[in-house]
Image (tube, rainbow, N blue to C red):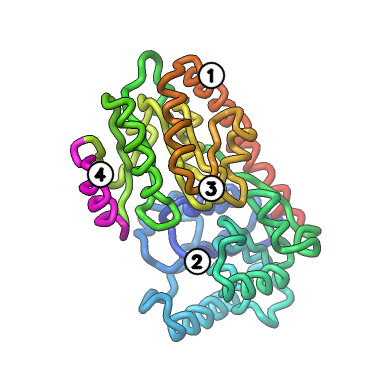
Amino acid sequence: MNNKKILFVCAGLGGGISKIIRFVSESCIDNFEKVYLLHRGRENVNDIPHKEIIEIISPINQSEGTLLWRYEHILQIRNEIKRIAPNIVCCFGTEQCCMVAMAMIGLRDIKLVLCDRGDPYTLPRMWKIISKWAFNQASNCIFQLKKQGEWYGEKVMDRSVVIPNAYFSSNSVIPHVGVRKKTIVSVGRFVYEKRYEVLIEAFKIVYEKHPEYRLIIYGDGPYKNRYHELLEKYNLINVVELPGYTNNSASAINDAGVFVLSSLYEGIPNSLIEAMAIGVPTVSTNCTPGGPDFLTDHGKRGLLVPVNDVKALADNICQIIEQPSLGITLSQRGQEIINILDKDKIKKKWLNFLCNI
């Protein structure tokens, strides 16, 4: 493959997708003649490793979400693809995959690889139609979970592969040994799908039973004021912290008593991976398309509860608090994910697939 070029496309270089796209693009450096990375230009490219080897391209970034912007964005993607003339275009993220598929109409000599990192089951009706069309145009597809691919149908799955996220260890953080703090923690954006309202309501129940515990939610976003209002309503202002984003979540949550993922849907959540890998006992919603179910081995490495079930979430958090032996067991089993998602194993799967398209 050393005489071939590959172009990676994504919406931006922040969030969970950025980790995997940086990981995969860097993995391709020694296996392709040239590696390109095209994104919307919202982040500082100086933060990107190997930028002297990977050519970074930033297309337009104006009035995102409008029809005019989408049209202009699709045109610019098409122009860049024609200019670069790669052998493979590999795109991440549902919306971006749809725009790239449109941009590549008629460019049949270039292989299109689309990667779904979210939950197609919860897409709005219009995006369900468009995304199903887009993934049927692709030469090949990559999914984090089998259930993601099954939504697109047998024809798509026949030319697809399932590759989970890799675990990116923080070398400066090792699993905590000894007594854990009386804290319940979570990490994520303050948006609807994270369902932190459910976590706050569940914590209200937990706090009534265990007033020595505190809740800490690391993150920020448009729902922050809503959460503050909820905390005031439940008189939890003094026992719940919203400290904002953390650049090192592994260090921030390392000695916590319980990690909670309350999401409505997730692909394979990096925050849950990180919590399990450093030995924090976890409780997660069993959300579609099955990321937490996969990571916890159906509830063996971490507890699973139904989506939006406040009582079940509170009961399972209390179960870990009240049964120290359960917390120790979940901590030990959770760390099994380190070997399962070993980055060298995941890198090999990506290269085997991309180099044999």
Mark positioned earlier in the residue sequence (2 or 3): 3
Magenta residue span: 222-238
The amino acid sitting under disc 2 is: Leu
Q: Position of residue 26 (x, y in %)?
A: 54, 49
* Residue at position x 39%, y 67% in the image: 41
* Residue matched to label 2: 38
Mark 2, Cα crowd under 10 Å, few <14 / some 14-19 / many 20+, is many
Q: Which mark is residue 23?
A: 3
The amino acid sitting under disc 1 is: Thr
Question: The N terminus appears in which quarter of the rendering?
Answer: bottom right
The quadrant in which residue 36 appears is bottom right
The amino acid sitting under disc 3 is: Phe
Judged from the image, the secondary structure of the residue bearing numbered disc 4 is loop
Give the Cα separation between the discs numbered 4 and 2.
46 Å
Give the Cα separation between the discs numbered 4 and 1.
33 Å
Residue 101 placement, left or right of 185: right
Mark positioned earlier in the residue sequence (1 or 3): 3
The amino acid sitting under disc 4 is: Tyr
Judged from the image, the secondary structure of the residue bearing numbered disc 2 is strand
* Residue at position x 55%, y 62% in the image: 93
Give the Cα separation between the discs numbered 4 and 3.
42 Å
Mark 1 or 3: in front is 1
Mark 4, Cα crowd under 10 Å, few <14 / some 14-19 / many 20+, is few
Residue 106 placement, left or right of 328: right
Give the Cα separation between the discs numbered 1 and 2.
44 Å
Q: Position of residue 107 (x, y in %)?
A: 69, 79
* Residue matched to label 1: 329
Mark 4 or 2: in front is 4
Mark positioned earlier in the residue sequence (1 or 2): 2
Front-most of 111 and 303? 303
Question: The C terminus appears in which quarter of the rendering?
Answer: bottom right
